Amino acid sequence: MGGAATGPLLARTAYTITMQNADPADPSSGMAFSPDLLKVRAGASVTFTVGSGAHNSQSTSGMLPDGAQGWRFGIRKSGTVTLTRPGFYGYHCLPHRRMGMVGLIIVEGEGMTNNLEAAKARDHPGKAAARWADLWQRAERII
C-alpha cells in the first residue's frame, strides 16, 4: 500500500493523489489511491487525478472533522480540495469502495485528534473494512 508523506514533504502546500486500477507499490492489491495515506498541514490543497480506470473521489460521511467541507468528484474527473480543518479525512471511490478503494488524509493542527474516534468507528463494506484496518495501523505510526 502507499506510504505517507512525512518529514520534509510536510512543508509542501500542494499534493496529488492518483486514482488507479492498481497500487504501484502492490499491483496485486487492485483498485487504489496512490498514496492512500497522506499527512499534511492545515491549508494544504490535495488534487485527485485520474491515473487509470473509471474512478472518483469523495469524502466518506462520518469521517470528516466538525465543520469540514466534504467533496465529491465525478467519475474520471480530477478535482482539488483545500483542507483547512485539522483532523482525519476519510475518502473513497464510490464504484470501488467495496473492493477496498479508500484513503485517509491526516491534517495537522490544533484539535487534530478531535474526530479520530468517530472516524475509526465508521463501518465499511466489503474489502474496505480490511483496508481501513491497515490504514489506521499505518496512521498510528505517524500521528
Image (cartoon, grey):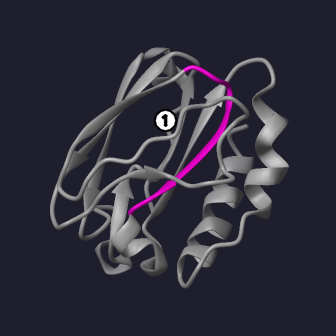
Locate the N terminus and report the quarter of the image it occupies.
bottom left
**Is 11 drawn above or below residue 40 in the view shown?**
above
In which quadrant of the rendered view does residue 126 lie?
A: bottom right
Residue wearing tag 1: 5
Q: Residues within 10 Å of mark 1 (few under 14, many from 20)?
A: some
Residue in the picture at 37% in, 52% down:
57
Residue in the picture at 32% in, 65% down:
23
* Percent position of residue 6, x then y: 54, 31
In which quadrant of the rendered view does residue 80 lie?
A: top left
The region drawn magenta spans 84-93
Residue in the picture at 38% in, 77% down:
29
* Percent position of residue 110, x then y: 78, 18
| Circle 1: residue type | Ala
Q: Is residue 118 left or right of residue 69?
A: right
Residue in the picture at 30% in, 57% down:
56
* Percent position of residue 114, x then y: 83, 35
Helix, strand or loop at disc 1? Answer: loop
Q: Is residue 49 left or right of residue 114?
A: left
